């Protein structure tokens, strides 16, 4: 992802869920029969929204050339057409005198592409291109069989070399080694297409700061447009937030401090407990997305564009829980001296990652993987403690470590439950911290995975912060109805 930094765009980050600007517009317009034009407009709106969001949140975003599979119909047709064109060009240039019809068409296209790659400051190069690749002059030379195609190709290659990105230098060296005019023109067109894509990606990255400034309002307005056109609804988003409210209320964690227990105020109560915090409920809702069960309910509409990123973080979270649990069990059984040996924890992490890769998949044999991990772990511990190879360690200690590692496969394993709760509390604290505050302290039980945990928390916070800024008005209206039903005093949702 790859993700947006916490300070981008941080100038309008709300202290809590912001007020809804159009409170009565959530359900959109009355249902009506969508015309083909409406469907095309909605598809275009969704495409623009998705593209803008991807550019903003994904620092590594770039356009890539689309090439159909060779065994597909599209790929077969494309290959046949291209081969026919280059064979025709070869045949034309082999005539006596040569026929330059296709070659001139290619030179015209090459000139247009090169001009499109020039920056405003390339005044001299632009004039030189117009002079050397003068199509009228080239046609006259072709008519009199005086066209020097090799000279023009060499000039084109040298011009491309001056304009291309460093990553294309190997391609340029290959071009300089070609002598056959057909092969040279074919490769020139291929490399130019790569250079065009490089220029597009360069432009996107250059405009990214300006896009960041407008991204929140743009995405919010586009999403509201989809709501008005009935392209999407907020039913799944409402169900998602309602589940978070029920979970937060049942566990008593309804304030911004994850470990603070607060009860929901009741009408007519003589006591005045702290009010429910919409911000804390929303943070818990985001946390639920990291362990989302697709069979339980539909994914919230407002988070669909980040679903892939959140699912990836959820997989990392699941692996991190197992990794931290194994490290904690090893530390408790073998003592801190083993874990403090240089390189031991790093080697153990690599072993855990290798053996537990794919643990998020439903058909993954977690029991077998942990059994193999226990065997491998015992070997690493023995090697660290200097136990000679072939010498059997004490049976009780050996079997106890393996049994505890194997027992982590159980969902209700106490060590695994403890680690999972600690990580969830840490992530909630990361979300509730303001931009001016330093990140929360990593719990002692998670010290050995502090680097991975901070990286996970930073990526999670970036996604959540941007999503809140865009969809906060919609969340505000929904949470107001869920937390403050009619008959109760409504609290300003902007207060903590």
Image (cartoon, grey):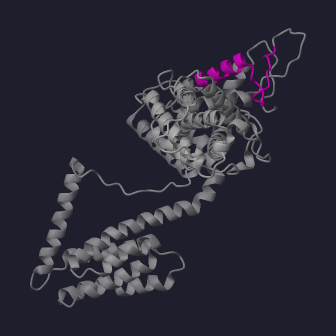
Which residue is situated farthest in the right direction here? 270
Would you say residue 258 sits in the magenta stretch?
Answer: yes
Q: Residue visible at 82% across and 17% down? A: 489
x and y, in percent, of residue 243 in the image: 62, 20
x and y, in percent, of residue 45 in the image: 49, 42
Residue 447 versus residue 7 in the image, above or below: above
Identify which residue, 203 or 377, lies in the foreground.
377
Would you say residue 344 sits in the magenta stretch?
Answer: no
What quarter of the picture does the C terminus occupy? top right
x and y, in percent, of residue 423 in the image: 66, 34
Is residue 21 at least partly visible in the picture?
Answer: no
Is residue 114 at least partly visible in the picture?
Answer: yes
Identify which residue, 173 or 355, lies in the foreground.
355
Q: Which residues are magenta?
A: 238-265
Q: Describe residue 341's horizontal placement relative to residue 176 as left or right.
A: right
x and y, in percent, of residue 174 in the image: 32, 76
Which image quadrant is residue 449 in?
top right
Residue 77 versus residue 283 in the image, above or below: below
Which image quadrant is residue 332 in?
top right
Residue 106 versus residue 278 in the image, above or below: below
């Amino acid at each position: 992802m790859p993700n947006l930094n916490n300070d981008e765009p941080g100038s309008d980050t709300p202290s809590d869920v912001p007020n809804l600007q159009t409170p009565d517009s959530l359900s959109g317009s009355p249902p009506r029969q969508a015309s083909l034009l409406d469907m095309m407009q909605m598809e275009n709106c969704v495409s623009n929204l998705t593209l803008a969001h991807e550019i903003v949140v994904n620092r590594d975003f770039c356009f890539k050339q689309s090439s159909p599979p060779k065994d597909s119909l599209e790929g077969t047709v494309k290959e046949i057409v291209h081969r026919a064109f280059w064979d025709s060009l070869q045949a034309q240039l082999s005539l006596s005198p040569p026929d330059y019809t296709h070659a001139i068409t290619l030179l015209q296209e090459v000139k247009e592409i090169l001009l499109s790659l020039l920056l405003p400051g390339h005044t001299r190069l632009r004039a030189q291109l117009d002079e050397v690749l003068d199509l009228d002059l080239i046609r006259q030379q072709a008519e009199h069989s005086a066209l020097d195609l090799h000279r023009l190709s060499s000039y084109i290659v040298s011009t491309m070399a001056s304009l291309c990105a460093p990553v294309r230098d190997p391609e340029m060296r290959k071009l300089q080694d070609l002598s056959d005019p057909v092969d040279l023109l074919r490769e020139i067109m291929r490399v130019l297409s790569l250079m065009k894509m490089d220029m597009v990606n360069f432009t996107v990255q250059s405009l990214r700061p300006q896009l960041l400034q407008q991204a929140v309002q743009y995405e919010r307005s586009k999403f509201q447009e989809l709501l008005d056109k009935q392209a999407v609804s907020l039913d799944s988003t409402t169900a998602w937030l309602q589940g978070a409210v029920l979970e937060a209320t049942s566990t008593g964690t309804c304030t911004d401090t994850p470990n603070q227990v607060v009860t929901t105020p009741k009408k007519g109560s003589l006591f005045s407990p702290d009010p429910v915090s919409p911000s804390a409920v929303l943070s818990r809702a985001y946390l639920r997305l990291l362990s989302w069960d697709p069979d339980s309910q539909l994914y919230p509409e407002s988070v669909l564009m980040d679903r892939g990123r959140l699912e990836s973080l959820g997989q990392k979270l699941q692996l991190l829980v197992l990794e931290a649990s194994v490290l904690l069990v090893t530390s408790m059984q073998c003592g801190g001296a083993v874990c403090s040996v240089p390189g031991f924890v790093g080697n153990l992490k690599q072993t855990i990652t290798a053996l537990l890769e794919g643990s998020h998949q439903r058909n993954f044999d977690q029991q077998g993987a942990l059994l193999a991990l226990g065997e491998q772990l015992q070997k690493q511990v023995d090697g660290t403690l200097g136990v000679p190879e072939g010498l059997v360690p004490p049976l009780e200690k050996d079997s106890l470590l393996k049994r505890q590692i194997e027992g982590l496969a159980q969902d209700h394993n106490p060590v695994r439950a403890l680690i999972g709760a600690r990580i969830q509390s840490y992530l909630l604290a990361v979300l509730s911290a303001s931009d001016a505050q330093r990140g929360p302290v990593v719990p002692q039980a998670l010290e050995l995975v502090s680097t991975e945990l901070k990286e996970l928390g930073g990526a999670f916070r970036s996604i959540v912060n941007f999503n809140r800024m865009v969809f906060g008005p919609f969340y505000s209206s929904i949470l107001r109805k869920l937390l403050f039903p009619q008959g109760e005093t409504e609290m300003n949702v902007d207060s903590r």
